[in-house]
Amino acid sequence: MAVSSVKPPLRRTGSMSTSPIYRTEYQRDVINRLKRIEGQVRGLIDMVEDGRSCEEVAQQMSAARKAMDKAFYRMMATSVMEAVSMSESEVHTFREVERSTRILEKYA
């Protein structure tokens, strides 16, 4: 069985011409996730107003909470990937990863 290796993205120095495209793609992904969650929450409101069972509501709340967590982690992963791929130095990369780590520790 062959072991495949994952190559890190090339560091870009100076010209960051692909940055807006990269960022826009992942922003769109996070926004789409949040819009789906918004729909789930509206559905939850309808369920409560309709008097659905506690278990049914709890199941949907759990799904919405997990979706929110996935959106959060996707946003954080994108932030780290962008910082690493766009970094001009190892010191800058380290600082950006540390910043992301603090955010994860605080909010995750």
Image (tube, rainbow, N blue to C red):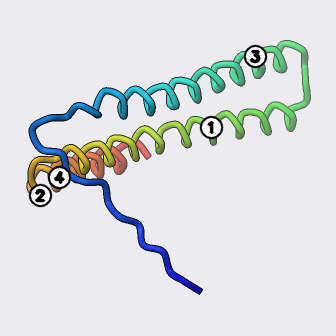
Q: CA distance from mark 4 to mark 1?
A: 29 Å
Name the residue carrying label 4. Answer: 93
Circle nearer the viewer, 1 or 2: 2
Circle nearer the viewer, 4 or 1: 4
Q: Residue at x 54, y 83 (%)?
A: 2
Tell me the tag on residue 101.
Answer: none
Q: Residue at x 28, y 33 (%)?
A: 19
Name the residue carrying label 3. Answer: 45
Q: CA distance from mark 4 to mark 3?
A: 43 Å
Q: N-terminal of the two: label 3 or label 1?
A: 3
Is residue 66 depicted above or below 95 in this figure? above
Q: Amino acid at mark 4?
A: Thr
Q: Residue at x 41, y 66 (%)?
A: 6
Name the residue carrying label 2. Answer: 90
Name the residue carrying label 1. Answer: 67
**SS under mark 2:** helix
